Amino acid sequence: MPARDNGAASHNAGRKPDPAGRSRELLLRILSSAVILPPVILLFWVGGPYFLALVTVVAAVMAWEWANLVAPRCPASLRRLAGLIGALMVLAASLAFEKPAALIMLIALPLAFAFAVRIGSGNWAPQLLPGLFLALCPAIAIHWIREMPELGLETALWLAFSVVVTDVAAYGAGRTIGGPKLWARVSPSKTWAGLFGGMAGSAGLGAVLGTSIETADPVLLAGIGAVIAIVAQAGDFAESAVKRAFGAKDSGRLIPGHGGILDRVDGQIAVLPLAAALMLLSGKSMLLWSWP
């Protein structure tokens, strides 16, 4: 058995990458992004119930993809129910900002889901429940940030695009420079060059934004941007570790060329709740922070 494994590894190691396949995948990614981004940005801009509808749908898909990833043998009806409960939890959390009584619903929903899972088909709750909170936290965080009374739209777009720029810059730097791997056992394609490239890209975006907002500090936002890149990369590694543990390449196939929603928002899952918590403690947007 070891000899066969080593032979297969040697054979795969000797195979050259397919440039045409990579080009097709890159083209598919670009086309998918061109279709998806405009309506998403429009809903960011409009805000209110329309943006809440967007994050609710995204949270439902995230919870459903998580269920498919970690419990593929669980009945399909329960996996779909996980998506529905994920959406309802986001709605309950959004109501709780103005009506604290909605917190009762927020607590009751996962408990009711766990009970339904237990009664319906065995003990799948330990696998499925984390997906509900994985979907809830970034969804309600970005909704709260977007609805902040001062610079909410700008802050939400900056955080979201900082993660996107991190991914793009890290991909470009990693492919161009190469070099030592960050954590090859979990994510073989990630390199130190990619990490520093992502940090530089996100820092650059923060600096540019800081020069365009009168009350912002470009240097501070550049530093925050670099930290955002590190946190986003940590989220990427966490999702890669989960996929590797369950033998999956992608979290789903919903977005052509990109995989699933979880694959696209893994960095956001780590960044958005942390950013929202820090802004909640400070009482203002990061764009208004200043040096102590």
Image: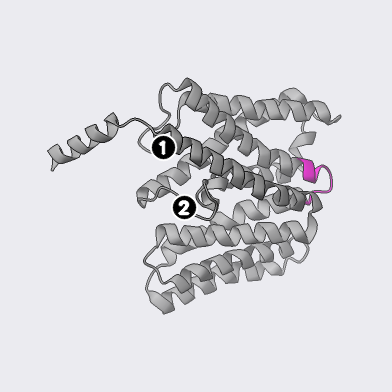
- Number of residue marks: 2
Going by the numbered disc 1, the residue's amino acid type is Ser
Label 1 crowd bin: few (<14), some (14–19), many (20+), radius 10 Å = some
Quadrant that contains the N terminus:
top left
Q: Per the image, is 87 magenta?
A: no
Q: Residue furthest front?
A: 20
- Element on which disc 2 rests: loop
Task: Tell me if residue 283 can be seen.
Answer: yes
Please give the name of the residue rendered at 53% of the width and 55% of the height, measured from the top-left corner: 254
- Element on which disc 1 rests: loop
* Residue that badge 2 annotates: 251
- Horizontal side of 56 relative to 147 (left or right) equals left
Task: Tell me if residue 292 can be seen.
Answer: no
Front residue (pair 88, 275) = 88
Mark toward the start of the polypeptide (1 vs 2): 1
Q: Per the image, is 151 magenta?
A: yes
- Horizontal side of 285 relative to 237 (left or right) equals right
Please give the name of the residue rendered at 78% of the width and 63% of the height, measured from the top-left corner: 98
Please give the name of the residue rendered at 57% of the width and 47% of the height, measured from the top-left corner: 265
Residue 203 percent across, percent down from the top left: 66, 27
- Horizontal side of 16 relative to 173 (left or right) equals left
State which quadrant residue 119 falls in.
Answer: bottom left
Q: Range of the magenta residues?
A: 147-154
* Residue that badge 1 annotates: 187
Please give the name of the residue rendered at 46% of the width and 62% of the height, measured from the top-left corner: 67
* Residue 290, above or below 49: above
Residue 30 percent across, percent down from the top left: 59, 41
* Residue 147, above or below 122: above
